[in-house]
């Protein structure tokens, strides 16, 4: 089985296992997802969803959040960890959206990557979830599962994993597949103790076949 064939098999099986492929961050607007994905670094989505309730209630739009001082933002987002750097990035990002993009989140990878605190993972999430464009979000779940399954071989650098997946995954499937990797990584393919016996991919997974 080629890697492209394996990818299609994995896509089909995970679709059956997890029919709903959705982002686990709660948001109504693109700018909110930008804030949340920055806060989610080294923090759980569940905690982020709680913390941003106060943040968005106090600052209900890009202009309001851009006008806030980083210290004011930090006081609210501190429970997510790395409060100072996250608050600084959020402040700079919102101010750039206000001053350069007329309070609109850009819809191209090139423009998104110009925003402070936005890397390829964050930009791909926005591209896929907000704008419905082809996207591959190489978070820790995606990287771990792709290596275990055999979609990539010993590749741990996010950008390299992303580029490898673009070669074998249909563009329209990338965003949903990455959400399903997160769901499967949490439910079955745990980082420390994967439950291979309960895995729908066991017979096609490089690691599962050896267990």
Image (cartoon, rainbow, N blue to C red):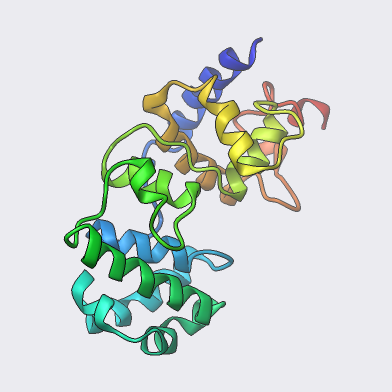
Q: Quadrant of residue 107?
A: top left
Q: In this rendering, is residue 46 above or below 127?
A: below
Name the residue nearer the viewer: 195 or 6.
6
Specify the farthest residue to the front: 100
Q: Quadrant of residue 150?
A: top right
Q: In this rendering, is residue 103 above or below 126?
A: below
Name the residue at 38% across, 42% down.
110
Residue 158 in view (yes/no): yes
Name the residue nearer the viewer: 87 or 19.
87
The quadrant in which the C terminus is found is: top right
Q: Quadrant of residue 148?
A: top right
Name the residue at 46% across, 62% down.
117
Q: In this rendering, is residue 80 above or below 108?
A: below
What x and y, as percent, mark residue 161?
62, 35
Name the residue at 44% across, 57% down.
118
The answer to whether residue 49 is left or right of residue 192 is left
Number of numbered discs on residues = 0
What x and y, as percent, mark residue 183?
51, 46
Name the residue at 70% across, 51% down.
191
Specify the farthest residue to the left: 102
Specify the farthest residue to the right: 210
The quadrant in which the N terminus is found is: top right
């Amino acid at each position: 089985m080629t890697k492209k064939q394996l990818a299609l098999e994995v896509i089909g099986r995970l679709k059956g296992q997890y029919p709903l492929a959705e982002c686990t961050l709660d948001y109504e607007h693109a700018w909110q997802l930008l804030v949340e994905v920055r806060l989610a670094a080294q923090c759980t989505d569940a905690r982020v969803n709680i913390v941003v309730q106060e943040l968005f209630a106090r600052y209900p739009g890009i202009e309001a959040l851009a006008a806030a001082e980083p210290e004011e933002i930090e006081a609210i987002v501190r429970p997510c960890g790395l409060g100072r750097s996250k608050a600084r990035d959020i402040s700079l990002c919102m101010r750039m959206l206000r001053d350069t993009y007329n309070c609109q989140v850009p819809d191209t990878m090139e423009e998104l990557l110009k925003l402070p605190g936005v890397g390829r993972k964050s930009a791909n999430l926005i591209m896929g979830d907000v704008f419905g464009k082809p996207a591959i979000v190489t978070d820790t779940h995606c990287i771990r599962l792709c290596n275990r399954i055999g979609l990539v071989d010993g590749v741990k650098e996010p950008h390299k994993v992303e580029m490898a997946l673009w070669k074998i995954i249909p563009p329209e499937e990338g965003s949903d597949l990455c959400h399903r990797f997160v769901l499967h990584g949490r439910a079955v393919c745990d980082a420390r103790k994967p439950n291979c016996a309960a895995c729908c991919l066991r017979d096609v997974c490089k690691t599962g076949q050896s267990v």
